[in-house]
Image (cartoon, rainbow, N blue to C red):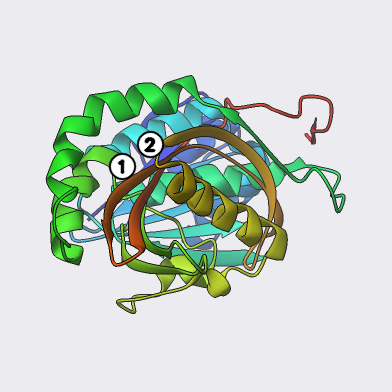
Amino acid sequence: MSRWLIDDFGNMKPAGAVALAELIGIPCPDAEDDVARLEDYAILNVGLVVVQDKGTSVRIKCRPAVLSPRAFSTLSHWLLEHPHVPALVEWFNETWDTEHAPDARTAVNLVSYIVELKQRAPVTPTDRIRAQPSVQAARHWQRVKASVGALTKGKPDGSAYARVLDPLFFGRWMVGEVDAGGGGIDFVACGTGYPVLDPFFSAREPTRTLDWIKDDQYRAWVVDGFIDVVKTGRPRFDDVDAIIDWPRFGYLRTRYWRVLVPLTESAGRWRVLSASGNDSGIDLRPQDIKVLS
C-alpha cells in the first residue's frame, strides 16, 4: 500500500509528515494526530489531494471547490495509469461524502463533475438547457463509425454492445429502444463510464426507462433528442451546456458533447445509440456563470 500527495501545482510526492510540512510551509509536526489534522486542513484550504493506493483499489480524498486544474490533471493521469482499479472518492462540499467508481475513467468523470460544484449559476425555469451542433462530436463519430457498424445488424445483446462501445466511448454510452409510434424509450444497455449523478445511471436492470431521471425538463429534452433521430433517420451531434437538477448535487452545470445515432429498426422500434464525452471547455452561457473563489 502507498499514499501520495498532489499539491496545487500538480506535484505528486509520497505522503508523510515532512512532505506535508514542506507543502504548507510550517515546521514538521511530530504526533500522528497532528499530521492527520494538518492533512485535512491542507485538503480543505489549499487544494491538496490525497491518493491511497491499496493495490486492488484506490481511495481519493479532496475538496473540489479548491482543487486546481494542475492538481486535477495530475490526478487524472495517475488514475488512467491504473485503468481497471476501482476507486472510492471521498470529497467535501458542505459535508464529507463518498462515491464509488468501478474504474479509472468513471473516477475521472465523477471528479470532473464534482469540480463543477464550485461554479454557481442562476437557475431559471427557462433556458436551463443549451445545445448547439458539435464539430468535435461529429469528428469523433467519423473515427468510430466503422467499428460501430457491427451493431447495425440484428439485435445485439448487452455484452455485444459493451464489447464494441466501451473502448470507443470509455463507457459513456447507452442504447435505447424507441417506439416510433408512441415515443416511449426503454434502455437495453448502458456503459459503466457515467458517474453516479442520478439513480438511472447506477441501476442495473436489463431494461430501464427515463422515468428514473428526476429533472423533468432535462428528461423531456433527452426524449426529444431520441425521437428527433428516429423521425429524421439521421445522426445528431450536440455540444451541451445544461444546468441539471441531479439528486446528489442539486442544480449542477453539466457540459458534454453528445452523439445520437440510429442503429437498427424492427417492428416499429428503433435502437438508438447515445454516447457522450465530458468537456468543461464548452461554454454556451458565458454571461451567466460566476466562478466563486
Residue found at x 76% / y 46%: 128
Residue type at mark 2?
Ser
Residue type at mark 1?
Leu
Check disc 1 and report its element: helix, strand or loop. helix
Q: Please name the residue that numbered disc 2 is placed on.
A: 76
**Looking at this view, is 85 or 279 the one in front?**
279
Q: Please name the residue that numbered disc 1 is placed on.
A: 79
Image side of residue 223 versus residue 262, left or right: right
**Looking at this view, is 4 or 203 the one in front?**
203
Q: Position of residue 38 (x, y in %)?
A: 58, 50
Quarter of the image with the N terminus in it: bottom left
**Looking at this view, is 293 or 231 the one in front?**
231
Residue found at x 12% / y 45%: 150
Check disc 2 and report its element: helix, strand or loop. helix
Determine contact: label 1, label 2, CB under 8 Å: yes
Q: Mark 2: give few (<14), some (14-19) or many (20+) Cα within 10 Å.
A: some
Residue 201: in sight, yes or no? yes
Residue 63: in sight, yes or no? no
Furthest residue in direction bottom, as rendered: 205
Q: Position of residue 31 (x, y in %)?
A: 50, 58
